[in-house]
């Protein structure tokens, strides 16, 4: 933990997790093992972060957001948690958002609450996600639209709108057939 980080009593942080400058983890937050929380990261009470996640600088993970394991969140990503926010409201309705294992979110993307980002999905930098993203799907734009499919390693395997039968990149196909090793 960096000396300037604030980790409130009651926050659960797994072993090997590194917390950088000016990060804040609230009581009631759960952060898994071997994660990296970058500078100015905020993890709210009720938020859940899986193991081996990397959350880059200036990201707030609010109550209602659940990140699976091995999730990458690019710098400046914005998560929301209320579909009808009002400053005058004494209460709000938290709308859950789930980011499944292995998903990657590019810098400055906005993830509107109530959506699910599937396993190994990839959200392009600056995208605004307003609907669910399928497993291995690549989305981009505002609002985010499907633009392809990616391997678990992040390599684009198809730009076709239809989901390909094989979601492995050539390198992973070769490795699984014994023709080569994956590095």
Image (cartoon, grey):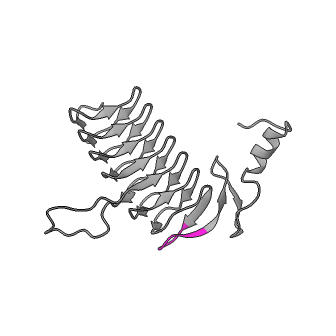
Quarter occupied by residue 134:
bottom right
Name the outermost residue toward the bottom.
143
Position of the C terminus, as image quadrant, is top right
Q: Residue at x 74, y 61 (%)?
A: 164
Relative to 180, 26 lies left or right: left
Where is residue 143 shown, x and y percent of the image? 48, 73
Q: Residue at x 45, y 57 (%)?
A: 107
Relative to 25, 123 lies left or right: right
> Compared to 23, does 14 lie above or below?
above
> Compared to 106, does 14 lie above or below?
above
Where is residue 49 shown, x and y percent of the image? 40, 42
Position of the N terminus, as image quadrant, is top left
Relative to 105, 17 lies left or right: left
The residue range painted magenta reads 140-146
Q: Residue at x 23, y 38 (%)?
A: 27
Of 93 and 19, which appears nearest the observer? 93
Where is residue 157 shown, x and y percent of the image? 72, 57
Q: Residue at x 37, y 43 (%)?
A: 48
Q: Is residue 21 magenta?
A: no
Q: Is residue 144 magenta?
A: yes
Relative to 177, 9 lies left or right: left
* Numbered-mark total: 0
> Compared to 59, does 137 lie above or below?
below
Where is residue 117 shown, x and y percent of the image? 51, 57
> Compared to 13, does 109 lie above or below?
below
């Amino acid at each position: 933990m960096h000396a300037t980080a604030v980790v409130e009593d009651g926050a659960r942080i797994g072993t090997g997790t590194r917390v950088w400058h000016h990060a804040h983890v609230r009581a009631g937050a759960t952060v898994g093992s071997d994660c990296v929380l970058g500078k100015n990261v905020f993890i709210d009470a009720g938020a859940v972060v899986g193991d081996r996640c990397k959350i880059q600088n200036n990201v707030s993970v609010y109550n209602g957001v659940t990140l699976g394991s091995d999730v990458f969140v690019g710098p400046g990503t914005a998560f929301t948690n209320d579909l009808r926010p009002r400053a005058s409201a004494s209460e709000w309705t938290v709308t859950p958002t789930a980011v499944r294992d292995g998903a990657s979110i590019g810098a400055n993307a906005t993830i509107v609450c109530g959506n699910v980002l599937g396993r190994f999905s990839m959200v392009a930098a600056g995208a605004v996600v307003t609907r669910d993203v399928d497993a291995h799907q690549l989305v981009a734009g505002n609002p985010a639209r499907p633009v392809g499919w990616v391997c678990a390693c992040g390599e684009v395997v198809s730009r076709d709108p239809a989901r390909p039968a094989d979601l492995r990149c050539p390198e992973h196909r070769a490795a699984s057939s014994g023709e080569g090793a994956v590095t």
